[in-house]
Amino acid sequence: MLPVPAYLRRVPPRAAPSVFHLHYSDRFFALCAWTGVALSLALVAGAGDAVPLGVSMLMWAVLWALYLSIVNVGQTWYGFGWESLLLETGFLAVFLGNEDTAPPVLILFLLRWLLFRVEFGAGLIKLRGDACWRDLTCLYYHHETQPMPGPLSWFFHHLPRPLHRVEAAANHVTQLVVPVLLFTPQPVASAAAALIVLTQLWLVLSGNFSWLNWITIVLALSAVDGSLVADAPDLPHPPLWYGILVIAVTALVVVLSRRPARNLLSRRQAMNRSFDPLHLVNTYGAFGTVGRIRLEIVIEGTDEPTVHPGTLWREYEFKGKPGAVRRLPRQFAPYHLRLDWMMWFAALSPAYAHGWFAPFVERLLEGDRDTLRLLRHNPFPDAPPVRIRARLYRYRFTTWHELRATGAWWHRTHVREFLPPTRLS
């Protein structure tokens, strides 16, 4: 929908460093992706601890470089804040050492600095953004209007309103007070990390936020005092070159942190922004504004040659985003359904659909196999439709009474046309 070769012709390597500037083909892209999968599995299996320190660091560096290459050509599909979060965390992981090396204190504090920016940035953007965060009413709406509800979101939405206010207040404490405690002596820092982990697990239960919650949990573990659960082993002193490299990386991160730190203090705080093409030090934040109503785009097709009042339109079903009102939302996180997320943004404003929605509809009209694999249900298995249209609906969670009476988790009302009936020219 947004071809990489066309993007590479417009953007110089300096602005978006990527191995694909050297060569691009779909097969080469797939090779890089599967190489990353294989290397990840090897590291999870302990390969990084079975090789010398330098080789282990190289394995982590290759993993980071491959994902950076994909993110920097991914355009809209890879524009989410957790892409930068994964890259920044992955870069610091290169310098954590292996089984024979104690994690450098400097790198551990850089991980805490990253966690602080994730949490504190999200807390500040809420206070500076929507008034409902200040009057503690945002959770009246959030569970229903979040990008991709999970299987328990309906139940979270129907919690008593006083409990929603407690949720909002607890969020402010966890994001604005607790992160400061990460830099205090133990065991206070470990207690602060534990509170962040509990908050993230609450978010895991209440919605689908890709791997954002899980990587935040991993970062929080860097602040936990390991001696509380096990004795620290005696390890040899690390090589001199490794110590020098760690100091150099720390100095680099400190220098690059100036702009993200200034952004935190700015009244015009930006969310989820990278200040360098390598995504080494970024700014984060989420839900500075909470929607009061949920809008969804429903895409329908017909195989009838002419459109008339009695035309039969059949609906395309997406894997994660709400569609059929009787279908309970599923759990997909930490997997990231990029198309479903972008459909949520497009419903907020057609500007978010610019560039990719028309090619998406075109591929549905062509019956493109790879595009149809992104969907849960293709209502035209034998031949593509003649025309496609898109309609905007308002969705809301049903009440307990409506659920018992109809078996529907959602109630929807037609708002307006999003895309008139369209066919291939």
Image: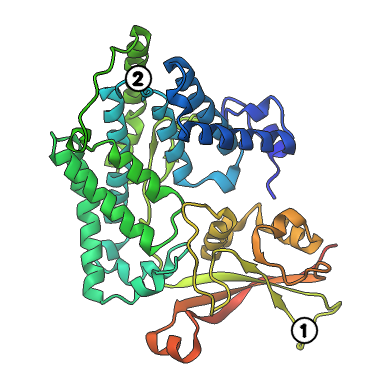
- Percent position (x, y) of residue 85? 42, 40
Residue 249 horizontal side relative to residue 123, left or right: right
- Badge 2 element: loop
Q: Residues within 10 Å of mark 1 (few under 14, many from 20)?
A: few
Q: Tell me: residue 362, above or below residue 94.
A: below
Q: Residue at x 45, y 45 (%)?
A: 81
- Colour theme: rainbow
The C terminus, quarter of image: bottom right
Q: Residues within 10 Å of mark 2 (few under 14, many from 20)?
A: some
Q: Amino acid at mark 2?
A: Asp
Is there CB contact under 8 Å for labels 2 and 1? no
Which residue has dot 1 on it? 311
Q: Residue at x 76, y 87 (%)?
A: 309
Q: Amino acid at mark 1?
A: Thr
Frontmost residue, 344 versus 221: 221
Find the residue positioned furthest to the top: 240
- Can residue 257 be seen by looking at this rendering? yes
Q: Residue at x 83, y 78 (%)?
A: 304
Frontmost residue, 262 versus 254: 254
**Discs 2/1, front:** 2
- Percent position (x, y) of residue 423? 80, 67
Q: Tell me: residue 86, above or below residue 104.
A: below
Residue 290 falls in which quadrant of the image? bottom left
- Can residue 421 be seen by looking at this rendering? no
Give the number of callouts. Answer: 2
- Percent position (x, y) of residue 8? 68, 33
Frontmost residue, 78 versus 272: 78
Residue 144 falls in which quadrant of the image? bottom left
Q: Residue at x 32, y 61 (%)?
A: 130
Marks 2 and 1 sit apart, C-alpha to C-alpha, by 69 Å
Q: Which mark is residue 100?
A: 2
